[in-house]
Image (spheres, rainbow, N blue to C red):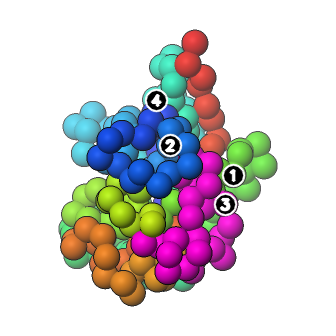
Amino acid sequence: MAGYLVAAGGVRVDWQEVGLPSADVISMSDCVVDLVPANRDGWDDWFDDPVSAERARAGRSGLRVLAVGIDATHAPALLQELVEAGYRPDFGGVAGRLARREAFPDLTSGRVLGFELVGFDTGGWHTWTCLGGLVDDVRRATGVGPGRWGLIPDEEDALRAAAWLTASGLGDPKVFSWVPALLVDVGTHPTT
């Protein structure tokens, strides 16, 4: 369990990957969508629980609460990157949850959206769809491409694509490891 985010729906923009199958994008990356900060100073977008995330979303249109999960096999390397960037597990947050190997909650009322390939870079998360050409590079090399919302529907495909992308060295030069993040919509407030 990485935590919860409150995210606006995104629309593919000119600088973003042109190979996306639709204009509607769901992401955990603030280079693609707007995220609601979890604290007053705006430095952290991650909520510890769905209740506080839902509270931040309440009364605002076009936002969804996303539960984000990281495969346990990727947690140690990702945690190391977080620690090197100054996010210590004893401070809590994403690093703390990954260090404790918190289980992904049973979200039977949530809607599984798919997997997003993401990489951590000094305080932020890049997505494979925000760096031009990566979607096509991954598709050519692995046969894996994004489905609806720019997400990969199958976990095995997402794991294979992330492994290839990490080994390739392509993408942002500061992203060393790409991981598939499971995105589950646990609360949506439709635009009215």
- Give how far across and how far down residue 73 sits, in percent: 54, 82
Foreground residue among 42 and 48: 42
Look at the magenta stretch and give its main secondary structure. helix
Instruction: Tell me the element at label 3.
Output: loop
Q: Which residue is mark 4?
A: 56
Q: Are marks 2 and 4 in contact (CB under 8 Å)?
A: no
- Per the rendering, the mark at residue 25 is 2
The answer to which quarter of the image holds residue 183 is: bottom right
* Label 2 neighbour load within 10 Å: few <14, some 14-19, many 20+: many
The answer to which quarter of the image holds residue 114 is: bottom right
116 lies above or below 74: above
Q: Earlier in the sequence, mark 2 or mark 4?
A: 2
Foreground residue among 191 and 1: 191
Q: Are marks 3 and 2 in contact (CB under 8 Å)?
A: no
Measured Cα–Cα span from mark 4 to mark 1: 21 Å
Q: Which residues are magenta?
A: 137-160
